[in-house]
Each structure stands twice: as structure tokens, then as C-alpha cells.
Amino acid sequence: MTKFLFFSYIRHLLFNLSIIILLAAGQGDTQGTNDYYDNGNYALTSSTHKSLLIAAGCFWCAEQAYEQYAPGVIEVVSGYAGSDGIDSPTYRNHPGHYEVILIEYDPNRTSYELLLQYAWRNIDPFDAYGQFCDRGFSYQSALFYANEEEKMIAEQVRADVLDLYPDWDDDSVVVPLLERPFFWRAENYHQDYYIKNPWNYGYYKERCGRTKRLKEVWGDEQYFCYHDLELSCFNETAVNENGVSIEAVVNIKNAPEESGRVRGAPVWGIIVAVVFAVGVLSLLVVNFMTCCKKKKQLEIEEDEEKSVAE
């Protein structure tokens, strides 16, 4: 049992160390403003577009889910937001902030309501202390509204979810609906991480258990419906903000398709494992050699004692 606990601890330590290595530094620098939706230091690519803010745990994974599978999404930007957060937050210093994504969308191709439905299917609504393997306030889930109309829609979507899952206890669903705060764009190395580092990203997402947990919560069918490039569950259609059913368009960014096969640990993970293994092996070799030396010394001393006695 002691040996099992030891190796479990080492495995957990190596995984956390690997995530730290993934987050080697960089800084974001784009700026822009929007009076109504408070897009913070990000400028929408068109004045006809709108935006939505959600917190769904690790922003790498949330960004990928929306850019690839949600209809009408133009761009997703990783960042930080929180009504009690500090100004100019960074990854290494963002107290009071959630990790969030800002979703730029075309209201003629989708709607706030539809994108909220996607938000729910990409979070664990029962986890009040983080999401999946990530713990702490910044990884907690939250859905934001910009005005009273959006607040009413958000409340209705929540009610619809509870109607769809009548066995769920209302009090156990801990996703807050909050007034939308100022958005701070995250550092450049966080943006499009799943595209720029597909191997590292795939390894992290699989090890963090995100897909597995979402299927446990929502069921395989619901997970498939909201992570399907063909939108086959919705007859390849989407309802826009005018209430019109239109042909759905997903992956407008044309991001590479997510691989269903996750390879082993990335290069950095292998290096960490090798260095650790070499260190352990070296200690064992040194210990063995020390024991042999002591044994040999004892044999010499015993021989000397016998010679003196004779």
C-alpha cells in the first residue's frame, strides 16, 4: 500500500509539473473597446457582431469547444474576468478573476440562447470548487449576462436544463449567473493553444478527464450532439437571434479537427520522466555500491582480527 501511494503521488506530481512547463511565459498586448458588451481589451472584427462571456474551467478547452463545434462563432479569445478582480491580470497573478472565454459571434447565424446551451454542455454543473482536474476559484464555472434581456434568457436556459434532467437537485447545480464584468485578454501564448500545440493540448485534456466527466454528467448522446461538426442532432440547422432557423455553420475558423486518439506524453513529459528515472536509478546504484563497500570493509576487518588471534 505504501508503494502504491508513493507512485500515485509521483504520478500526480509529474502531471502538475508538466502543466507548469506548458505555461512557460508570454504576454498579450491587443487592445480595443465596445461600449455595450464591454469586450475589454479585445476589439470585435465587425460592428455587426456580438459577444458572450463564459467561464468553463481551463480556457484552452473552452476555446476549442466553441471554435470547432458551436454554430455562428467567429472567434474565441481566452482571458480573465471578475467583478472583484485586479486590473491588468496575468496568468501568474489574477486574484478575483475567472479564466473565461469571450465568444465573438454573428447574431444572424446563431444566438445568445443557443450559445448558452452549448456552455452548459461544456461544464460540470455540480462542481463548486473548479472544473475537472483544475481546482480553485479561477477555474470555477460561471455564465454572464450583459443586460436584463440576456439575464432572462440565461435564467430560462437554466430552467430548460433542469427540466431536461428532472432527477437533478436544483440546489446541487452550482453554476452562477452573473453580471458581465470587464474582459482582460490573456497572454498570446494562451490564444489558440489547441491549434499551436495540439499534442500538448490533447495530452492535457485527456489527462484532466474533461471529456470523460462531461459524458458522465450529460450522457453520451448529449455530449455527441454538442460536439458534432455535422450538427446531425439539430438537422444541421441553428436558430439565430431573429428566431429564424437557418443552415448551421460551424468551425468558421477552419481549425484542424480534433483527434480522437491521444498519444503518450509529449516530449517535455518524457524528459521529466527520464530525468526522474535517472535520478532514482542513480540513488539506487549509489546505495548498492555503498552497501558493497561496507560489506567488503567488514570482511577485511574480520580477516585482520583472525590474523591477530592466530
Image (cartoon, grey):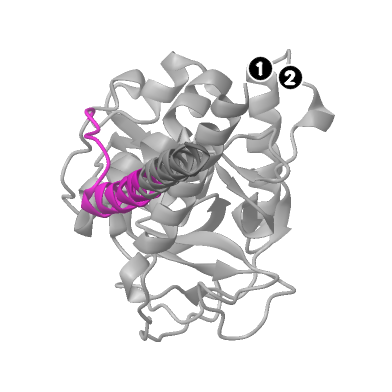
- Asked whether 263 falls inside the magenta stretch, the response is yes
Amino acid type at image mark 2: Trp
Q: From the viewer's perspective, is 307 left or right of 144?
A: left
Residue at 23% across / 38% down in the picture?
258
Pinpoint residue 177: horizontal percent, then vertical percent.
71, 50
| Quarter location, residue 284 | top left
**From where the camera sits, is residue 111 visible?**
no
- In percent of width and height, residue 263 lies at 21, 34
- Callout 1: few (<14), some (14-19), or many (20+) C-alpha neighbours within 10 Å? few
Q: Which residues are magenta?
A: 260-285
Q: Visible in this render: residue 250?
A: yes
Q: Residue at x 27, y 41 (%)?
A: 265
The one of 68 and 203 positioned closer to us in this rendering: 203
Tell which residue pokes out farthest to the right in this image.
171
Q: x and y percent of residue 115 in the render?
A: 47, 44
- Report the Cα–Cα distance between label 2 and label 1: 6 Å
Q: In the rendered view of the protein, which quadrant contains the N terminus?
A: top right
Residue at the disc numbered 1? 165
Q: From the viewer's perspective, is residue 169 above or below residue 277?
A: above
- Give left or right: position of 141 versus 270: right
- The residue lying toward the viewer, choosing from 2 and 241, is 2
Q: Please state which amino acid type lies under the numbered disc 1.
A: Tyr
- The residue furthest front is 310
Q: Position of residue 45 (x, y in %)?
A: 30, 73
Name the residue carrying label 2.
168
Residue shown at 74%/19% (left/top)? 168
Q: Are marks 2 and 1 in contact (CB under 8 Å)?
A: yes
- Secondary structure type for disc 1: loop
